[in-house]
Amino acid sequence: MLTLYGKDYSSRLLLGTAQYPSPTIMAEAVAAAGPAMVTVSLRRETAGGKTGGEFWSLINGLGVDVLPNTAGCHTAKEAVTTAQMAREIFATNRIKLEVIGNPDTLQPDVFGLVEAAEILAADGFEVFPYTTEDLVVAERLLDAGCRVLMPWCAPIGSARGPLSIDALRSLRGYFPDTPLIVDAGIGRPSHAAIVMELGFDAVLLNTAVAKAGDPVKMAAAFADAVRAGHSAFEAGMLEPRDMAVPSTPVFGKAVFS
Amino acid sequence: MQVFIRGAGVAGLTLAHELTVRGASVTVADIRTAIAGNASWLAGGMLAPWCERESAEEAVLTLGRAAADWWDGALPGHVVRNGTLMVAPARDAAELSRFAARTGGFQWLEGTQVAELEPDLAGRFRQALFFAGEAHLDPRVALLALYDRLEAAGVRFASGRQAADVLERDGNWDIVADCTGMASRQAGLRGVRGEMLILHAPDVTLSRPVRLLHPRFPVYVVPRADHHFMVGATMIESEDRGPVTARSMMELLNAAYSLHPAFGEARIVETGVGIRPAYADNLPRMRRDGRRLTINGLYRHGFLLAPAMARQAAATILRDRLEVLHETHR
C-alpha cells in the first residue's frame, strides 16, 4: 500500500490530465489506469485564475484524488500564489510544487523550490516537490517539511527514461522511509517498470500517455508496468552475474565434458 | 419553410446557406451588431483535416475532407488550395516522425523541395511534411462574402439581443436553430481559450499555412493578404476572455521568429482572444428536438466542420418537410 501524507492508495501510478486529444479520452485513460491521483495544472490551463470551470468539474468528476500543480511557475512567489489558488479551487492541501529554473529543459530551480516548500509546508500544505535526483536538495526539502519527494528521471516530456540509475538508486538508499515518486522523463512502460524495480514508491507521468497513439491503451499498459515493477521489487530480483549459471544442476549428469 | 437561426458565426451562416439553396426562407439574428467579434472571426481558416487528424478523432477527417470543396462552391475564388507545410526545428525533428505516424495525406519533403514550395524558407528546414490536399481561406473575408451572398439571396439579418428575442417569439418559425456557440450555455459545453496574433511582415512571403511542430507549443502561421499573417493559436482550458497573456504572446512570437527571423521585424497588428465551444470529446453535435435544432461544439474546427454539420442539419430539416408534404398529399 502506498501511503502519502497519511492517506493510503492502492495504485502506484499518478497521472497528469494535460495534452490529451479530448477530455473524454483523458477520462477514459484515467479509468483505464486507475491512478492514485490525477495532477492538474492550474497556471497553464487557466489564463485568468478561476475560469477553467467546466474542465475542472470534469477533473473533479473523475472520482480520483486531485493533485494540483504549479507548472509554469518560475519563482517561489509565483508558485506559492498558485498553490494558494489551487487550495481554494480544488479544496485540497495537496500541491505538486514545481518551480522551473530553465525554460528550455524545464529543469527545477531547486533553490526556489526549497524556499517555496518551506513557506507552503508552514502554511499547512502537503507538498509534493518536483526535484532533481540531487541528494542534498532532497535533504533540504525534507527539512523544509516535505514528506514526499518527486525526483525527475529525465527532463519533462523528453520520454528518455531513467538517465541516471545510480543517482536514483542512491536516493532510494538514503531515504528508505520517504515515499519517492519518479516524476517526469518516463517515455514508455519499460521505463516505469525499471524505476519501480529500483524500489521507487510510485511513478507520475502525463505526456507518455496523453500523446500516445491510443492514450487509453497506453494508460493501461503503464498501470501494468508499474504493478509488475513493484511486484518484482517486492519479490526480490537476481543480481546480474558475469558468468552463465545454468538453471539445471550439471553435477551428476551422465555425460559431463 | 421558415427558419430562424440564432448566431451569425460560421455555424449559423453555413446553415443559412445550406437552407437557402434548398429553398427555405431564412432569418439570421446575432446578439452582436457587427459580424466581427465571434469565435469564427478569430479562426485560422485552415481547411486541414489531415493535420488535425493527428490529435483529433477520425470523424474530423471524415467530416472535414469535403470542406474545401464546399467553400469553393459557396464562395468561388476564396479557397487557396496550396496545401499545408509542416516543419520542425532541427532539434525537434523526431516530432515530425511522430506526427507522421498519426495521420496520412502527406509526403515527406527534403530541404530543397521545401525551398521550391516556399522560397523564403530555403535552407531553414531539412525535412518537412507536405499535405498537398489541404487548403485555406481568410475567414473574415469569407464570412463577409457569405453574409453578402446570403443577403443577396433574400436572407434577412437582425442584430442585438432584444431584436433576436422578439423575432424568435413573434415569428411563425418551422425551425429555430441555435448556432450561438458558447452563448448557448448548453450543458456539457466547455470553453477552450485561444489566443492569436496578426502580424504584418513585409519581408516574408508564404503561399500556404506553415505549421511549426514543437513539443510544447505547436503553432501555425497562415498567410493573409498583403504580407499579413495570422499566428495561432493557444489551447487553454479556460473561459477567460481577458487580453492575451505575455506568456502566450511570447510563445507565439518565438515560434513565428523561429520559422523565419524576418518575423522579428513584423508589426503586431492585432491580438485576439476567443473562446472555442467544445464538448468533452471535442467533436461537434447537431441535435434536433422538434422544431428546435442546435449546431455546436465546433471547437477548433469551425471552418473545417461547419459545412458538414450544416449539410446534416439542412438534410434533417428538409427531409421532415418532404415527409410532411407526402402525408398531406396522400
Image (spheres, coloured by chain):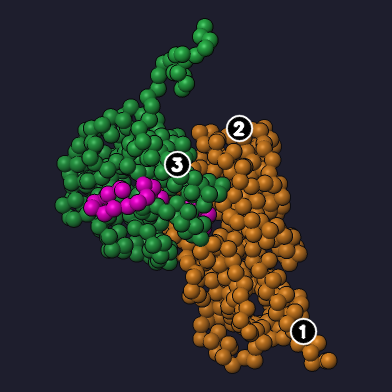
Chain colours: A green, B orange
Residues at marks 2 and 1 touching, judged by CB atoms closer than 8 Å: no
Residue drawn at 58 percent across, 87 percent down = B168
Discs 2/3, front: 3
Q: Tell me the element at label 2.
A: loop
- What SS does tag 1 mark? helix
Amino acid found under the numbered disc labelled 3: Ala
Furthest-right residue in view? B330
Q: Position of residue B29 (x, y in %)?
A: 59, 80
Seen at 24% across and 36% down, the residue is: A176
Q: CA distance from mark 3 to mark 1?
A: 57 Å
Give x and y (percent) for residue B193.
Answer: 46, 61
Q: Is A2 colored magenta in this rendering?
A: yes
On the question of residue B131 being in view, the answer is no
On the same chain, marks 2 and 1? The answer is: yes
Residue beneath label 2, please? B126
Instruction: Specify the quadrant that holds the N terminus of chain B.
Output: bottom right
Return the chain for callout 3.
A
Q: Are marks 3 and 1 in contact (CB under 8 Å)?
A: no
- Which residue lies under the disc numbered 3? A225
Q: Amino acid at mark 2?
A: Arg
Distance from disc 2 to disc 3, alpha carbons, whole Å, reads: 37 Å
Q: Which mark is residue B323?
A: 1
Which kind of residue does numbered mark 1 sit on? Glu
Residue A124: x and y, percent? 18, 55
Numbered range of the magenta stretch: A1-22
Q: Give me the chain letter of mark 1.
A: B
Tell me what residue is drawn at x 45 percent, y 18 percent.
A249
